[in-house]
């Protein structure tokens, strides 16, 4: 694929940006920070109405049969406007796991609901700081799950979860129907992510992948989500760069715009470079889906997007000075989101190790 989008893809980007800017505002998002257990209904309703939940799923199950490139375009615009729910990414991850590894019965049961957005999916792989732990906290035996899936993004409202669990001395990727499952809401840095611990006590679960192949399957799903998240991070970094630029052109000090000072203009120029590198890596990774180097490309996209968003969030506040830390201007929304996304789908340490191992020819 070319590093440039075609006409149809550009139309997706334009229309998704128009829809989100009309329906998502800072005033909608600020109250969510102080409330645990709520998300922005307007964003999620828009995602369902526009068909974004169906974008990368097969037509057989109500999808639009496009790909992660097009979903990345939506995620980029969601990042610009600070989407108020994590479900676009988490439901995509759950749906792809079922599409790629599930039985016909499992696909027929879950994919139509995930495509319409009426069913919400979650990915429960991590345990503590490890995105793919050697010893997952939950165990799967004889079709039942015991234990806890900690800090699951979207877990508070999810209907189905894809769980990475221990299976005797091996690992397993299983589907868990979350109806009736106990959930413990976590008051987090960004409450709109609806993070929760999922507490299993003999819950029934169906296998997707068992044995040695389970970790590789889980890593592939994690990489798919990481690419979507990289697009979202790039969108947030781009928005912050533009906010900083516009402020530097209008705010004056010593009789001239602060953008005339080298300490400001150089910082904004550096942000531009980081954003464009992150954008190129994200597009490249999306285009490599299905290829042998997909995980390598996903790791590079994830790392560059995390650096771009983190740096933009910090520098934009610095450029604004004292007003940058006020509640009203809302830059802390991006700061909170940048830190939250830096941990979802695995931290930079996880993806750095993964990238080094892949480049060194060691696959794990």
Image: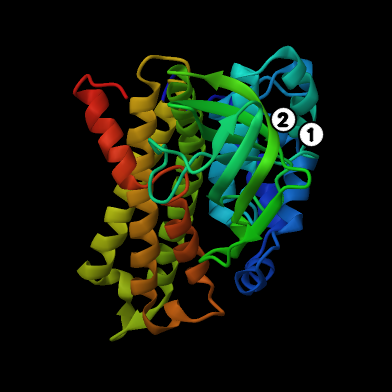
Which mark is on residue 290? Answer: none
Q: Say few, some or many: other residues with alpha carbon within 10 Å of mark 1 (under 14 / 14 to 19 / 20 or more).
A: many
> Depth check: 174 or 73 in front?
174
> Depth check: 127 or 5 in front?
127
Q: Position of residue 128 (x, y in %)?
A: 42, 51
Q: Is residue 328 left or right of residue 286?
A: right
Q: Position of residue 112 (x, y in %)?
A: 79, 27
> Depth check: 297 or 287 in front?
297
Q: Is residue 191 left or right of residue 354?
A: right
Q: Say few, some or many: other residues with alpha carbon within 10 Å of mark 2 (under 14 / 14 to 19 / 20 or more).
A: many
Q: Position of residue 54 (x, y in %)?
A: 72, 30
Residue at mark 1? 116
**On screen, residue 218 above or below 345:** above
Q: Is residue 269 left or right of residue 9?
A: left
Q: How many marks?
A: 2
Residue at x 54% of width, y 65% of height: 188
Residue at mark 2? 54
> Depth check: 52 or 298 in front?
298
> Decide: marks 1, 2 in contact (CB < 8 A)?
yes
Distance (Cα) linking label 1 and label 2: 6 Å
Q: Earlier in the sequence, mark 1 or mark 2?
A: 2
């Amino acid at each position: 694929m070319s590093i440039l989008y075609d006409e149809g893809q550009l139309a997706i980007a334009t229309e998704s940006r128009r829809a989100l800017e009309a329906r998502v505002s800072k005033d909608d998002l600020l109250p969510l920070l102080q409330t645990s257990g709520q998300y922005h209904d307007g964003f999620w309703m828009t995602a369902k109405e526009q068909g974004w939940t169906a974008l990368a799923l097969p037509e057989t199950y109500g999808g639009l049969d496009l790909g992660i490139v097009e979903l990345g375009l939506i995620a980029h615009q969601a990042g610009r406007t600070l989407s108020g729910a994590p479900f676009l990414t988490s439901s995509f991850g759950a749906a792809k796991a079922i599409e790629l590894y599930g039985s016909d019965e499992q696909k027929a049961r879950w994919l139509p609901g995930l495509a319409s957005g009426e069913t919400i999916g979650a990915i429960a792989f991590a345990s503590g700081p490890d995105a793919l732990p050697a010893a997952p906290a939950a165990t799967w035996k004889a079709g039942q799950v015991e234990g806890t899936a900690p800090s699951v993004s979207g877990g508070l409202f999810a209907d189905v979860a894809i769980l990475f669990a221990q299976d005797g001395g091996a690992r397993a990727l299983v589907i868990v129907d979350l109806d009736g499952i106990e959930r413990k809401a976590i008051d987090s840095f960004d409450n709109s992510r609806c993070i929760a611990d999922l507490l299993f006590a003999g819950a029934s679960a169906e296998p997707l992948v068992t044995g040695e192949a389970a970790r590789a399957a889980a890593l592939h799903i994690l990489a798919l989500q990481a690419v979507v998240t990289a697009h979202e991070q790039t969108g947030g970094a781009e928005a912050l760069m533009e906010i900083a630029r516009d402020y530097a052109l209008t705010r004056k000090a010593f009789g001239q715009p602060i953008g005339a000072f080298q300490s400001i203009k150089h910082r904004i120029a550096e942000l531009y470079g980081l954003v464009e590198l992150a954008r190129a890596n994200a597009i490249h990774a999306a285009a490599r889906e299905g290829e042998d180097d997909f995980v390598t490309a996903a790791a590079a996209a994830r790392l560059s997007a995390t650096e771009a968003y983190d740096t933009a969030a910090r520098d934009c506040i610095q450029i604004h000075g004292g007003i940058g830390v006020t509640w009203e201007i809302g830059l802390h929304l991006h700061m909170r989101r940048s830190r939250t996304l830096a941990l979802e789908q695995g931290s930079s340490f996880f993806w750095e190790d993964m990238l080094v191992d892949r480049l060194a020819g060691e696959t794990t």
